[in-house]
Amino acid sequence: MSGPQVLLLMRWQRSSLSLLTALALTGLLAIPARPKELKPETLAAFNLYVHGTETRIRQDARDGHFLVIDDLADQDRSEAYGQLRQGQIYIRRLRGDEEGEPIDIPHGLIHHWVGIVFIPDATLGETLAELQDYEDQPYKYAPLVRQAKILAHRGNEFANYRQLYHKQLVTVVIDAEFDDIYDRLDATQATIRSYSTRISEVADFNQPDEHELPVGNDHGYLWRYYTYYHIEEKDGGVYVQVESVMLSRTVPAVFAWLVNPLIESIPRHVLTDLLGDTRKAVLDRRHREED
């Protein structure tokens, strides 16, 4: 093939790819115009997935694997801990199963990620106190958290409200209520189980007719949001592990090749930001107390 022919072929490939991308994005942006109902079989499959996840978490704890990196091979585990203490954030995608087989989620997608951050010089008590400071979350976790407040507090249980915000192609605003259960296992370890109890999508955000869409009958950006914290004080600081399990709608198969990588990247970015913001918030608290 001659030089001019190669150049023409490259131009055709670029223009074809641009056209396909434009068509796919057009389709993606049209998806929100059609609300999607959370079906009973989707919720049942999610609950089965969560049951398997919590069973695995309890088994890991019994096996002495409080953090997910504790079950790595010796060299990999040593490298992971070393990178964390150097300030890096550990992120890994997880996939639940039932007796070794993937769990099918009809009409839904599971986004399951785990991440760890190390906070030098911090204590377990300081970290828990910071995580329970819900009222200040809009300042510490912006722009993800726009509003936050405690709805009820009894013992180690905090019912709370958070308005979540994310913008990527489309702006998504969620009014969500959570039940956070704190368990301090001993002097160095604690866990938090956070279950969404109500999730409602906000339509026409920042407009005069802003309103909530019916729960479970919206665009399906986020239907369930469960989070599991493992917090451990050792090595001269605190390790904070966050494992999140989210449920959203599926996308039409014709757009899946473009949309699925984007959808899968969002939880990773959200988790990375959450861990980084948590480290900064705990360190800022320590500096304020020292002053």
Image: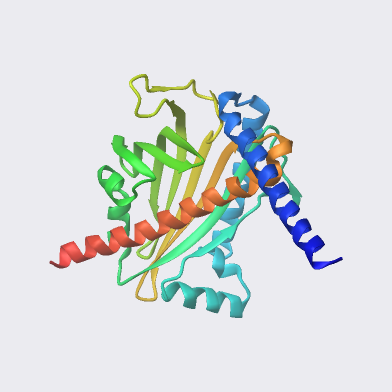
Q: Residue 59's quadrant in the figure?
A: bottom right
The image position of residue 141, as x and y in percent, is: 34, 50
Q: Is residue 221 visible to the viewer in this orientation of the structure?
A: yes
Q: Position of residue 90 (x, y in %)?
A: 51, 65
Q: Quadrant of residue 260?
A: top right
Left or right: residue 282 versus residue 191 is left
Label total for image: 0
Residue 75 falls left or right of residue 13: left
Which color scheme did the rendering employ for the protein?
rainbow
Q: Give the vertical position of 279 relative to 104 (above or below).
A: below
- Residue, far left: 291
Query: Residue 49 at what x, y percent from top left?
Result: 64, 42
Residue nearest the viewer, comparing 18 with 260: 18
Answer yes or no: is residue 35 visible.
Answer: no
Q: Position of residue 150 (x, y in %)?
A: 29, 37
Q: Quadrant of residue 10?
A: bottom right
Question: From the image, which quarter does the N terminus lie in?
Answer: bottom right
Instruction: Please tell me which residue is depicted at 44% across the width and 25% down the height of the picture.
Output: 203
Which residue does the image show at 60% across and 25% down from the upper left?
36
Instruction: Give the position of the C terminus as an image quadrant.
Output: bottom left
Residue situated in front as seen by the camera: 35 or 177: 35
Identify the residue shown where x is 59% and y is 45%: 263
Residue at screen point 39% across, 60% down: 276
Residue toward you, 221 or 119 = 221
Residue lying farthest front? 4
